[in-house]
Image (spheres, grey):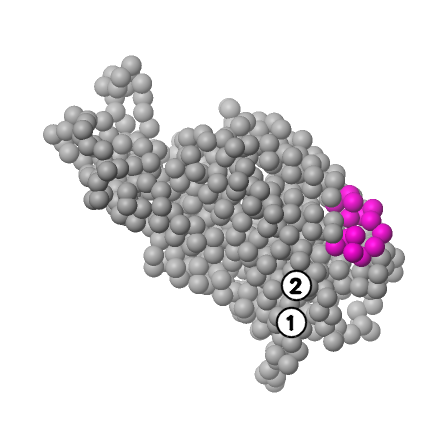
Amino acid sequence: MSRRNPADSPGGEDREPLLGERTARHDSRYDDDPPDFTDDQNSVQPKLSYEEAVEEAGFGLFHGLLLLVCGWANASDAVEILCVSFLLPTARCDLQLSSADMGLLTASIFLGMMLGGYMWGYLADLRGRQRVLVISLAVNGTFGAVASLAPSFWLFLLLRFFSGVGVGGSIPVIFSYFSEFQPKMRRGAMISALATFWMAGNILAAGAAWLVIPRTFLHVDLGWLDFQSWRVFVVLCSIPSLTSAFIFRLAMPESPRFLMEAGMEKEALAVFQQMYRLNHRGSRKPFPGLSPIRQLFIGPLISRSIALLVIFYSISFGYYGLWMWFPELFRRAEDGGSPCANMSQPQNLRNESCYPVKTAVYMEGFVTAASNLPGNIFTILLMDTVGGKILLSGSLLLSSASVFLIYVVKTKSQSLIMSCVFSGVSVISWNALDVVGTELYPTQLRSSALGFFTGVGRVAAIMGNVVFGQLVDSNCAVPILLVSVLLLAGGLAALRLPGTKQMDLT
C-alpha cells in the first residue's frame, strides 16, 4: 500500500496507507455484495485508508465471533495464572511447600511472562499477530498440562515458568490483534468487552477449583505418583489455552492493519472482504537504527511511557501480589478475624494436614472472582463516554483505598466484603489500561510496547509474590499497605496520560 504523493492530495496533505479503490457514486452500505476493494488502475477515485476500510467493512457478526474467540483466549490466560493460587491450600502438603516456596511458585509464572512478553510482542510486530498467538497459546497449554505430572516442587516450578512464557505472549498480543479489527467509534467498548473475559476466566478457575479439588476421590495411583484431585484441576486449566490455539490456527485471519503495514495488500484485501461478508454489510518500515523499546522513550512518547511504566508496575505488584494470595489468606482466616490476625507465628506445614479440604476457601474465592462482574459492566457502558484515562485513574485510587481497608477491618466477613470491593474496582483499572495501552502507540510499536510494559508488570508481580511469601507469616501489614501505596501512585500517574477517547489508531 503505497502512499500518494502529497502533491496529488487535496491541500498537499500526506495520507496513511491506502487500500483498493472506490467509485464516486457507489455506496457499498446499500449493497448485498462486498465492495470491490481491489485496485482499478483506470479509476481516478481515492483509495480507502485503513480506518475507512474498517468502517466500510461494517460491524456485526465478524466482530461478535472475533470477541468470542479472543475472549476465550483471554480467559484461558486468566485460568492458567490463577490455577496455582487455587491449588496452593491443598498442593502445599503433597509438594511440602513452605510460605517462601509458595511465593516462588506463584512468582514463577510471572517470571516466564516477563521473558515471554517482550519476545512474543517483538515477534508479533515482526512476523504477525495470529501466528504468535497460536504458538504462545500452545506453549502455555502444553507446559501447563505437563506440570500436573511433576512429582517434586522444583520440577513443578520449572514447568509453570515455561507455561508463563506462553501466557506472556498471548496477553499483550491478543489486545493488539483485537483492536486492529475495530472501528474507532466502537473500539473502547469492544476492548472493554474483551477484558471482561478475564473475569470469566477468574470465575471458571474458581468454579473448577471449587468443584474438583475438594473431591478427593478424583485421584489415581500411578505407582510413582499419587495423582490427586488438585492435579486433575491443573490438567483442566490447560484446556482453554489448547483449544484457543487450535481455533486461532484453523479459523482466524491475520490483523489487516499488520498486513497493510507489512505491504501485504492482497492479504489485507481478503481480510476486509471476509469481514464485510460476515457483517453484511503501504509498507511502513520500523525506524532504522533504534530498537522498539528505545523508541518508546524518545520524543513525544516519553512522558506517556514513563507514566505507563509506573502504572503497570503499581497495578501488577498490587493486584497479583494480593490476588494470588487470597485463597491462602481466606484459609488462614477460617478461625475468625482478619486475614492478618492469625499470622504472628510461622505456619508449621510439616505437621499440618491439608485434608479434608476446606470447601469454604474455594467458595470465598469464587465469590471474590464473581465480584468482577459489576466493574466489567461499568466499563463497557462508560468507556467510550468517560474515556479510559479517567476510569483508569479513578479506579486505581479506589483500589488503593479498598486494600487499605482490607488491613483495617477486624472480622472475616468484613475482609471478604472488602476483597470483593477490591476485585470489582481493580478490574475497571485493568480494562481501562487495556484500552489506553492499545491506543497510545503507533502500529509498528503497539505490540512491542504492550509486551515491554506487561514485562515490567511481570517483574512487579514476581516481586509482589516474593514479598508476600517472605512477610505474610511475620509482618502481614507491610505487603498489604505497600500494595495500597503503589496503587495510589499508579492512580496519580494515570492523570499524566493523554486522552485517547475515540481517537484514530495510527
User: Is 468 on the left-hand or right-hand side of 374?
Assistant: right
Q: CA distance from mark 2 to mark 1?
A: 9 Å
Disc 2 marks which amino acid?
Answer: Phe
**Quadrant showing the C terminus:** top left
User: Is 332 on the left-hand or right-hand side of 66?
Assistant: right
Query: What range of the chain is rendered magenta?
Result: 403-416
Q: Position of residue 124 (x, y in %)?
A: 42, 46
Count of marks placed on residues: 2
**Magenta: predominant secondary structure element?**
helix
Q: Position of residue 285 (x, y in %)?
A: 35, 34
Residue annotated with mark 1: 213
Q: Residue at x 55, y 56 (%)?
A: 200
Residue annotated with mark 2: 86
Crowding at mark 1 (Cα within 10 Å: few <14, some 14-19, many 20+): many
Q: Is residue 441 above or below residue 418?
A: above
Q: Is residue 302 above or below residue 263?
A: above
Q: Residue furthest left?
A: 42
User: Is 305 on the left-hand or right-hand side of 184?
Assistant: right
Q: Is residue 72 above or below residue 288?
A: below
**Quadrant showing the N terminus:** top left
Mark 2 touches mark 1? (CB < 8 Å)? yes
Q: Residue at x 19, y 27 (%)?
A: 24
Q: Nearer the viewer, residue 390 or 44?
A: 390
